[in-house]
Amino acid sequence: MTEFITVRPTRFGQKNAWHRDQIISSGYYLATMKLYQLVLATCVLAGCETKAPNAVKKQASTVGELNVGADFSTYEKVNKSAVRSQDHGRRFVDTYVNATGLEAYTDGDEAKPFPVGSIIVKTSWEAEGDAPSQIPGPTFVMKKMEPGYSSENSDWYFAMHWKKPVGSFAKQFPNGVYWESPSPQVKYCAKCHNGYDRQVGLVPEAARSW
């Protein structure tokens, strides 16, 4: 689902090693790797398959508290049980929708537009076998913005917040993660959601609370 820009590999000592030198000297290699690192970091956290987490750059300072969607505990929880989400790192997620977006989310008409100001928050829990653990994962946020905010993404804002990463992610992101639109680090979120009706993946029917 994510498009990567790749550089053709070469081996030291081979005749085509000049190709590597040409790329580096042109500056294309550096620009390519910078973009690759941004996309890779988001993919690793959100759950797309990748095998090179060591390429991710660490954040410079400790992240702050969640901003948009910080009051999610006052929203309507729209799942009656946690849902295993392949698109969110195979973690278990709970979904909360604010009053502005609740009718559009639960109406049953998947063509009904979400009004400006709709906020959807997914909290996540690391998996422990086939059940959620008590270890929190990232919080994922969407907000419907004013027309013209991001026409290619139907004017949705995206964010990923994880104040205290765990496991191998704690070493990669010791200061936490807070990425939000228009950062290129949340482009994976937008690209994935663009595959759903209204850019929103609803809670599976069996787990719905409505």
Image (spheres, grey):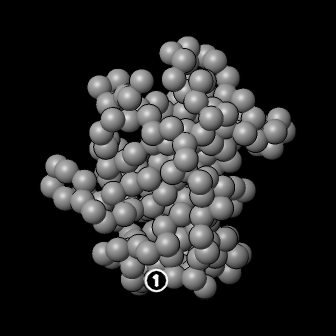
Q: x, y percentage for residue 22?
A: 63, 76
Q: x, y percentage for residue 175?
A: 51, 82
Which image quadrant for residue 193?
top right
Name the secondary structure under disc 1.
loop
Outermost residue toward the front in this view: 74
Residue 193 shows in the view:
no
Residue 44 shows in the view:
yes
Picture quarter with the C terminus:
top left
Tell whether 177 sits left or right of 184.
left
Outermost residue toward the left in this view: 129
The residue identified by callout 1 is: 174
Please tell me which residue lies in front, 98 or 125: 98
Q: Looking at numbered disc 1 in the image, what kind of residue is underneath it?
A: Pro
Q: x, y percentage for residue 170?
A: 39, 79
Classed neighbour count for the residue bearing mark 1: other residues with Cα under 10 Å, few (<14), some (14–19), many (≥20): some
Q: Is residue 208 above or below residue 63?
A: above
Tell whether 164 sits left or right of 70.
left
Q: Is residue 28 above or below residue 93?
A: below
Q: Is residue 195 above or below residue 103?
A: below
Residue at the spot x=65%, y=61% of the render? Answer: 67
Please tell me which residue lies in front, 66 or 15: 66
Residue at the spot x=46%, y=83% of the render? Answer: 174
Residue at the spot x=40%, y=50% of the render? Answer: 88
Which image quadrant for residue 68?
bottom right
Which image quadrant for residue 165?
bottom left
Please tell me which residue lies in front, 165 or 56: 165
Residue at the spot x=48%, y=33% of the render? Answer: 201
